Amino acid sequence: MSLLEFFTNHTYRMVLAGTVTIGFVAGALGSFAYLRKQSLISDVIAHAALPGTLLAFLAAVLLAGTGGRNMLGLIAGAVVVGTIAVLFANGVARTSKISIDTAMAVSLTIFFGAGMLLLRIIANGEFPGKGGIQDYLFGNASVITIADLITSLTVGAVALALMLLFWKEFALRTFDPDHSSVLGFSARAIDTLMFTTIVIATVIGVKAVGLVLMVAFVVTPPAAARQWTRTLPGMVTLSAVFGALGSGVGAYLSIVLGNVPTGPLIVLTLFALFLVSLLASPRRSIVTAVLTRRRARAALKRELTGKGSAA
Amino acid sequence: MTSASARRDGEFACVARNLSVAYRAEPVLRNVDLFVPRGVVMGVVGPNGAGKSTLIKAMLGLVKPLTGRTEFFGLPLARVRQRVGYMPQSATVDWDFPTTVQDVVLMGTYGSLGWLRRPGRAERARAMAAMEQTGIADLASRQIGELSGGQRQRVFLARTLVQSPDLYFMDEPFQGVDAKSQQAIVAVLHALREQGKTVVIVHHDLVTVREYCDHVTLLNQRVVSSGPAAESFTKENIRTAYDVAADDDSFLEFVS
Amino acid sequence: MNFVLGTALLAVVTALACALPGTFIVLRKNSMLVDAISHAVLPGIVVGYFFTQDLESPLLIVGAALAGLVVAVGSEWLGRTGLLTGDAPQGLVFPALFSAGVILVTAKFANVHLDTHAVLVGDLNLAAWEQLTVGGVSIGPTYLYVMLAVLALNCAFLGAGYSRLKVTTFDPQFAGSLGIRVGLVNTAFMFVVSLTVTAAFHAAGAILVIALMIVPPATAYLLSRRLPVLFALTAVIAAGGALAGFWIAYELDAATSAGMAVFYGLVFVVGYLGTRIEQRRRHRLHAVRAVSTAQSAS
């Protein structure tokens, strides 16, 4: 397929634009989850997006009487429930002897289990436009509509704008949690805001790539970007670029190869990007780490033998 | 090594030669030689980041050394494991762990039990004796998180005593300890010395070094001095180890 | 055996087989690793199928368990390079492996009946479908006996390794100084966990195996101060919750694992709120006592 063919096809353009948007936003905001050492929170969020979306669907159908397929409404539901899941996990970890990883696991299972039950209730009822579980697990990039794309762009832009607006606070809270409280910012408020932006970054991708793999969009680009840069602005920018690039290349490949699911291929592309970063980045790669270690070992050994001859 | 020097090394409780450790590319210990005679309390003293804990961990094989090796009673550690006890720094465990004081003390016997054997009556009796020696027998059934810092240290001390080793390594046993616990730990130290056991303690408080230790090793990545306290723990050596200016005597008033 | 009874028993046995090793995972603060391991099941099965060409082969379980071990060991290794922070290593490894599995299924084995979403969600009723008959009499689902074997294996492993698991979990440095090979104990334990996750996914689905493994021990952990109590409570919550969850799912005609996950979640929330109230009460009591002693002193 020629590039021209590729770009003149409406579906292909939608897939590309949709996944690149997701990759960009998730990459940028994933940096904060990464630096807070809580990357897997995005996995909790993605799973909590299931009941969130379903509740929004039910609300739209039962209360508003609309079709229930409104993307903005579904995203809003997922953001609200996702944020509750995050607050629940962090709250339990803060106020009891349960550690954060266990709290996240508990939160994930409660919300996903509830989502599965809701899905069953919806399936048993007569609702227009209801979907099956596989739509949520793996998503489907080829059904992205113009309206979906515009919604993703708008919501993603809001999340990025929040990040820029509260840049200073986010940065402080990420690097030095104790200090930021001293300066008079409410730590709880900043956390909630920061995690809400991460929730947004996670849920806008669920429809296209599914809740199982969304975690990779949030974790992989920052982990790759971290190997190349030392500053926060550098990391957020590079991570966003990596996310967009990996998504674009992965989506392109999946279309060109045909019959290969988009989400998994993007994840593998991002992972390849990460591996290259890990192996080849000049300052922090595994190769340089091994070399520095060897050099240090050799230097110490020289020092040792030098002493031996002096004595 | 010749057999003569091997015999000489057997006179020491432990000998470390040329021990160097690096965390990633940063050297923490450089060419440390350490000789600990039998039956002494040896204090390892030095400023923060001097590599005191690392020295002990490297000797016990818990941190892989870059160069050098350590022998205990003239033998490699694997052959004399039962004769060597270790009391780690306390901050590293989960205090919410659902376990009682007695359980923790019993863990000291696990090294001599295999995969399947459980601590029996003999082990329990030894644990009780160790708890009595450290003055925590009445706390036996408490959950460890309910104890004060000093009591926790005494639990870890009892856990090491249960092993009844000949050589003890203690990493900052007096850290965060109340007066009563301090007394109890010192009493145990003295009792061990009377039994002819050897103790190596990492120690922070310069004021009490002479009181607790017969021998002192001043460490700051390298060994500054090592030997009987009177020879090793001198003003000059402390100045060198702590990098203090020669005229700052207020810092050293207590050493005389 | 009655089908409902057999299926309920399968739920209880699966819950127990998962929850018992789960206690040590909670104590090791490594709960999200179960999520990572369970997602490696799919690629493990695919690769196993590549060699056996038989979806019924028990070797598939071993293959999948090895894939789980790859995630556990691989993420630990990535973490040790010091180039990554926090829980990122797990989040990097398992989506990549899972994606590879999905792509292999669609590209190579499209004609094979290997339903990725069945792997993820699982179906207890389907797992209980095949009945084992002895002398013409049904003695319950075949899979019940598979899970009983896994339960027996786990009990044997935990029984034999109890002391070592305890000391390596509580204080690995000290365990090392006793001459215990901490790395070996960890790897053996992770293999057992991996095997359990693999065996359980038929019944519970890969996503919610983590509910069975983590939530009952987490609740018990909130409420217990001794390890034997922790184990007993875990078993009670796991078995009781399995029955209650089975009933919820039966009433709603939903996946049993979802019913179990939600019920376990509710028990956890009740346990959590209970300990919170107890904490507050004790704080208030302390405050009152402090005030009264201050008053009597003055």
Image: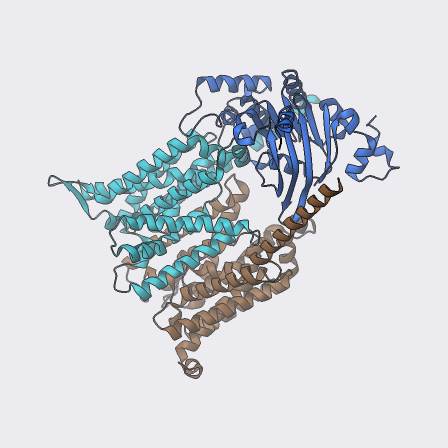
Q: Residue at x 55, y 43 (%)?
A: A94
Residue A279 appearing in the image: yes
- In this structure image, what is the colour of chain A? brown
Front residue (pair B62, C216): B62
Query: In the image, residue A33 lies at what x, y percent?
Result: 55, 56
Q: Residue B241's image quarter?
A: top right
Query: In the image, residue A121 lies at what x, y percent?
Result: 31, 55
Q: Residue at x 44, y 42 (%)?
A: C187
Q: Is residue C161 left or right of residue A41?
A: left
Quarter of the image containing the C terminus of chain A?
top right
- In this structure image, what is the colour of chain C? cyan
Quarter of the image containing the N terminus of chain A?
bottom left
Front residue (pair A54, A90): A90
- The colour scheme used to paint the residues is by chain
Q: Is residue A271 above or below residue B15?
A: below
Residue A166 appearing in the image: no
Q: Is residue A227 left or right of residue C161?
A: right
Q: Residue B7's image quarter?
A: top right
* Residue closest to the far left: C136
Q: Is residue A165 above or below residue B218?
A: below
Q: Is residue A166 left or right of residue C20?
A: right
Query: In the image, residue C33 lies at what x, y percent?
Result: 45, 48
Front residue (pair A304, A128): A304
Q: Is residue C269 above or below residue B156?
A: below
Q: Which chain is blue?
A: B
Front residue (pair B24, A167): B24
* Residue closest to the far right: B247
Total residue callouts: 0
Q: Is residue B228 left or right of residue B250?
A: left
Query: In the image, residue B23 lies at what x, y percent?
Result: 63, 46
